[in-house]
Image: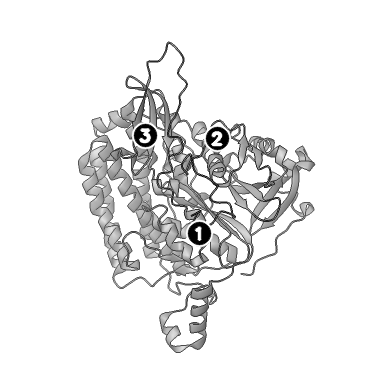
């Protein structure tokens, strides 16, 4: 929406290029991304992403809400990994408050965060393969994704907009049978990843469409601010879960998959390996799940239990106060980053001491990753743009906010 | 876990690699510092921001070689009204630092850092779009999220949440 009439510089006598508009309704642009292509035959001379079609002013809305009312808004930024956004916002506000989170809540957060990563990567893998022409993978991926959505429904009552992580802990105790269901899934999932890889990794058509396509060097990716698998596909070894651990990730063992070539295929391999690593973390979280409370001991911040409200006067008062006037947060500012399925998701929260955030800014991993598209695609064919966009794994809700 | 009060004394913090490197280069470039909740904020003088970023990026001992984020905070109605915020990350050392530039409401102009990190492009365009801050030397400073013909800058504090009716 930003630049509806691009005016590419075309030298006289060389006007053999044309402008082609891809999106915002193109199926391979995953939402409403518009890409303006200047092409010479099938070759791309210039490429310019145009965003803003999904801009809903979430950052402005946050400033008018109480701290706890922002949590459901964070779900709606990146609708494929809502829990990662919940987590990042909750961590930022907890850091502002100086809250300590009990171990069980932390481990639940890790467990669900990794399930979210698997969920997001499954949608990515399915749609990416569908873009390139492999239909079956999509159906396989959504079969497993259904299980994960069912888990989300079990814990929070919602399939997608979970709002399960709250400031100070998690919303509810997981229901009976939840951990058994997750364990069953974790046992069967690695063989399912084998199935996907069976369809794609050795497939010569998949190889031709992805190997050596949309290459980006490590230096370029770093300079452009790329993070996550887009950066690791080029061989840069950074993962915030391991390098700057949050919410107890230092207690888990996992490998960080790296690519070498920086092409679509390496980014694909990175994410598929991450699926396996994530399910490993899920198993560790299930095995070591501690007992104890799921909410921090901070009655002025955390909503009391339903039972306490029925029996204790104080709990009822706290509940009333939190709901009607929120809780004040000491003035200050915090930047909290987590490793979302797409890269560094960061929340910059500024407090002026009142019950509403003064400013909430979301550092979107996709927005920075999208900037790598021109470097990846210029000089290549139109068909490669589809593969490149898929390999960046964009979510327009997060880009436009 | 009670919160420790923020440290604002430069003497106490001058061993921090980012701050030490900036002070070695130009003491007048650092206006003020704040160390709060384990995060260091350095207020950089407006004319020096691009050079300060380049300096921190190229420091061989402690390179802050990755720009995480560019954003802005509006402190309307106090002056200087705007704070442009840069979040830098050191990938080898796993350390963050926050740079800030204060801008007056009457002339919200600051030098672009796209020549240091091309990745600042979208971030600066977003700040331009939503706060109306101009970045000199930016290659393509146009609205990015709002429509081209939009009036006003939505994230300014004097812009109503429900918009102008």
Q: Residue furthest front?
A: B165
Label 2 sits on a secondary structure element that is: loop
Please provide percent x and percent y for residue A333.
61, 57
The residue located at (54%, 36%) in the rendering is: B121
Q: Residue at x 37, y 64 (%)?
A: A287
Chain bearing mark 3: A
Q: In the image, is A253 to the left or to the right of A160?
A: right
Residue A358 higher or lower than B93, as above or below: below
Dot 3, how many residues are within 10 Å of its Cα: few (below 14), some (14-19), or many (20+)?
many
Say which element carries label 1: helix
| Residue B141, numbered label | 2
Residues at marks 3 and 1 touching, judged by CB atoms closer than 8 Å: no
SS at badge 3: helix
Q: Chain of mark 2?
A: B
| Colouring method of the image | one colour
Task: Report which residue position mark 3 lands on.
Answer: A388
State whether discs 3 and 1 lie on one chain: yes
The spot of residue A261 in percent (x, y) is 41, 31
- Of tags 2 and 3, the one toward the viewer is 2
Query: Residue A189: x, y in percent?
Result: 27, 53
Q: Give above or below for A293 relative to A251.
A: below
Mark pair 2, 3: CA separation: 25 Å
Labels 1 and 2 within one chain = no
CA gap, disc 3 and disc 1: 33 Å
Q: Is residue A38 left or right of residue B19?
A: left
Q: Going 47% across and 44% down the picture, which residue do you hit? A: B146
Q: Which mark is residue A62?
A: 1
- Spatial CA distance of label 1 from label 2 is 26 Å
């Amino acid at each position: 929406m930003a630049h509806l009439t691009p005016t590419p510089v075309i030298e006289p006598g060389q006007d053999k290029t044309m402008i082609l508009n891809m999106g915002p309704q193109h199926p391979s642009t995953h939402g409403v991304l518009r890409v303006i292509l200047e092409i010479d035959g099938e070759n791309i001379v210039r490429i310019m992403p145009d965003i803003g079609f999904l801009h809903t002013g979430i950052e402005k809305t946050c400033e008018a809400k109480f701290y706890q009312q922002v949590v459901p808004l964070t779900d709606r930024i990146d609708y494929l990994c809502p829990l990662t956004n919940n987590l990042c916002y909750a961590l930022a506000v907890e850091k502002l408050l100086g809250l300590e989170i009990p171990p069980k809540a932390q481990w639940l957060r890790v467990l669900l965060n990794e399930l979210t990563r698997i969920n997001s990567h499954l949608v990515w893998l399915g749609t990416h393969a569908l873009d390139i022409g492999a239909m079956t993978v999509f159906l396989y991926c959504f079969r497993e994704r259904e299980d994960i959505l069912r888990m989300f429904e079990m814990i929070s009552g919602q399939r997608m907009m979970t709002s399960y992580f709250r400031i100070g802990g998690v919303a509810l105790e997981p229901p009976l049978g939840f951990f058994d269901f997750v364990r069953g899934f974790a046992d069967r999932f690695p063989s399912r990843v084998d199935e996907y890889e069976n369809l794609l990794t050795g497939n010569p058509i998949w190889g031709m469409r992805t190997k050596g396509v949309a290459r980006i060097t490590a230096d370029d990716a770093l300079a452009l601010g790329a993070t996550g698998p887009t950066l690791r596909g080029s061989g840069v070894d950074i993962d915030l879960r391991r390098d700057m651990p949050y919410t107890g990730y230092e207690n888990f063992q996992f490998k960080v998959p790296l690519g070498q070539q920086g092409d679509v295929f390496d980014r694909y391999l990175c994410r598929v390996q991450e699926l396996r690593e994530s399910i490993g973390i899920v198993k560790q979280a299930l095995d070591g799940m501690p007992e104890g409370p799921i909410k921090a001991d901070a009655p002025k911040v955390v909503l009391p239990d339903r039972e306490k409200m029925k029996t204790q006067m104080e709990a009822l008062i706290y509940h009333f106060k939190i709901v009607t006037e929120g809780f004040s947060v000491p003035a200050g500012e915090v930047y909290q980053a987590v490793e979302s399925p797409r890269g560094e998701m960061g929340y910059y929260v500024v407090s002026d001491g009142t019950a509403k955030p003064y400013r909430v800014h979301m550092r979107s991993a996709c927005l920075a990753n999208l900037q790598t598209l021109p470097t990846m695609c210029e000089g290549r064919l139109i068909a490669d743009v589809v593969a490149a966009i898929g390999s960046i794994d964009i979510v327009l809700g997060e880009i436009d906010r | 876990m009670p919160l420790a009060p923020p440290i604002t004394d430069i003497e106490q913090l001058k061993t921090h690699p980012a701050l030490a490197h900036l002070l070695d280069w130009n003491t007048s470039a650092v206006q003020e510092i704040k160390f709060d909740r384990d995060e260091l904020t350095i207020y950089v003088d407006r004319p020096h921001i691009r050079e300060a970023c380049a300096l921190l990026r190229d420091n061989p001992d402690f390179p802050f070689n990755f720009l995480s984020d560019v954003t802005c905070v509006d402190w309307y109605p106090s002056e200087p009204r705007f704070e442009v915020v840069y979040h830098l990350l050191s990938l080898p050392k796993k350390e963050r630092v926050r740079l800030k530039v204060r801008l007056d409401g009457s002339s919200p102009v600051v030098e672009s850092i796209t020549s240091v990190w091309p990745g600042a492009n979208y971030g600066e365009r977003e700040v331009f779009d939503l706060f109306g801050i101009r970045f000199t030397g930016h290659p393509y400073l146009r609205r990015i999220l709002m429509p081209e013909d939009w009036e006003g800058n939505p994230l300014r504090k004097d812009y109503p949440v429900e918009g102008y009716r």
